[in-house]
Structure formats: structure tokens, C-alpha cells
Image (spheres, rainbow, N blue to C red):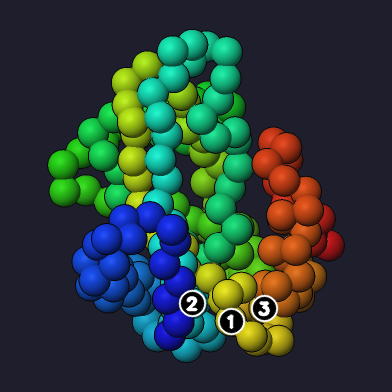
């Protein structure tokens, strides 16, 4: 496992390393549960590498005097397998459900778990799981601080190819996405930018 720590809370680096260990435990358990939900062996998603890489990034949103004129972060889905998000008490996170934006209010001691694009496609679950499109609203309150932990292998020097899990495929459920390296997916994701469209559509068969 390789952990990348973002430029945030530099004076608390040891706390972040300990936090990353605990997040990894949460991630391993979540991938076991998700594997079982797909009807697979509990270790399947962990064995294929979903927990091989973990990036932790801190987000800092200063208070905004005119939030109606801007956006904290525009609509997007995460470019990973799974995201574990720790919010503060400011709020502002929204998820898109049935074309409506729904607030995700912070709860003390709670973590927000987002399915990312790579788990939707498997480039894994072949659309059995759906990645969560979300955004963050600017606010007069602040600053808003959050810590996001991303499970993905794009930080690793690997040429591993991911594609829809063969055990989930059948004549009536053919693959919906082409096999690709996580690195290639991320190159496209960052070149495209947060323009409101789904990067996954580029990899759909």
C-alpha cells in the first residue's frame, strides 16, 4: 500500500498517517461488503487491487461574501473506486439524485462514502453500482474544511488493466465498458476537467 498525503495539516503529519491506517481498515471492510453485494467472494475487490492505493487530500473553502455568484466545486463524480469523506460542521455538500440536488448535512462522527467512476465501470461492477455525482456550494459561513480519502491505483507505477468483472457478465449482461488502465482513465479525467460531463462515457462500449 502506498499513501499520498496532501499539503494540508503539515504540522499534524503523524495524525494523518494514523488516520490513513484507520481509513484503510474502513476501506477494506467496505470492499468486502461490496464484493458480497455483487455475489462475489468477500475478498474479490481487495484482491484485484481496489485498496492498493490511498490518497488523502484536505480541502479548504474560505467563506464567500457572495455565494450566489460562484460555486465551491462544480458537478462531478470521483475518479476512483471509493471515497471516504470527513466533513466539518459547515455543510455545503450536495448529491444529484433523479436530477435534483440533495443536501448531505454533516453529522458528528459520521463519514460520507461515495462510489467512484472506477467502481461503477470496474472499469468493475458493469453499472451494478453507480458513481455519485456531487458538488459543493460556496457559503458565507466558513472556512469549510473536509478531508477526502480516495481509493485508487493511479498513484502507483502499475500497468494493471481493469475491466468489468467477468463473473458478473452474461449474454444478457454484456460488458458496458472497455478495459483500460487507471492511469489512462485519469489522464482523460484531468484533461477533460470538471465540465459537468461524465468521464465514464468516454470508455463506454
- Left or right position of 161 against 46: right
Alpha-carbon span between mark 2 and mark 3: 14 Å
Element assignment for label 2: strand
Q: Can the viewer see residue 29? A: no
Quadrant of the image for the N terminus? Answer: bottom left
Q: How crowded is mark 1: few (under 14 residues within 10 Å), some or many (20 or more)?
A: some
Alpha-carbon span between mark 1 and mark 2: 7 Å
Element assignment for label 1: loop
The residue at the point 33 percent across, 31 percent down is 143
Q: Do the residues labelled 1 and 2 touch (CB within 8 Å)?
A: yes
- Frontmost of labels 2 and 3 is 2
**Seen from this angle, which residue lies furthest front?**
11
Residue 124 percent across, percent down from the top left: 60, 71
Q: Can the viewer see residue 82? A: yes
Q: Do the residues labelled 1 and 3 touch (CB within 8 Å)?
A: no
Which mark identifies residue 162?
3
- Foreground of the two, 9 or 136: 9
Q: Name the residue under label 1.
A: 156
Alpha-carbon span between mark 1 and mark 3: 14 Å
The residue at the point 48 percent across, 56 percent down is 115
Q: Mark 2 points at which residue?
A: 53
Amino acid at each position: 500500500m502506498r499513501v499520498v498525503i496532501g499539503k494540508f495539516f503539515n504540522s499534524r503529519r503523524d495524525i494523518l498517517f494514523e488516520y490513513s491506517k484507520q481509513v484503510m481498515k474502513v476501506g477494506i471492510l467496505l470492499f468486502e461488503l461490496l464484493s458480497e453485494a455483487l455475489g462475489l467472494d468477500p475478498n474479490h475487490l481487495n484482491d484485484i487491487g481496489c485498496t492498493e492505493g490511498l490518497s488523502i487530500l484536505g480541502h479548504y473553502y474560505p467563506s464567500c461574501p457572495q455565494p450566489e455568484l460562484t460555486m465551491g466545486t462544480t458537478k462531478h463524480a470521483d475518479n476512483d473506486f471509493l471515497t471516504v469523506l470527513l466533513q466539518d460542521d459547515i455543510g455545503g455538500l450536495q448529491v444529484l439524485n433523479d436530477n435534483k440536488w440533495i443536501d448531505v448535512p454533516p453529522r458528528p462522527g459520521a463519514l460520507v462514502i461515495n462510489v467512484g467512476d472506477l467502481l461503477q465501470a470496474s472499469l468493475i461492477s458493469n453499472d451494478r453500482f453507480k458513481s455519485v455525482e456531487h458538488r459543493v456550494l460556496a457559503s458565507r459561513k466558513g472556512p469549510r474544511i473536509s478531508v477526502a480519502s480516495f481509493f485508487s491505483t493511479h498513484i502507483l507505477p502499475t500497468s494493471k488493466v481493469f475491466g468489468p468483472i467477468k463473473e458478473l457478465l452474461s449474454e444478457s449482461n454484456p460488458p458496458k465498458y472497455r478495459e483500460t488502465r487507471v492511469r489512462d482513465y485519469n489522464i482523460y479525467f484531468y484533461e477533460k476537467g470538471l465540465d459537468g460531463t461524465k468521464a465514464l462515457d468516454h470508455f463506454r462500449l
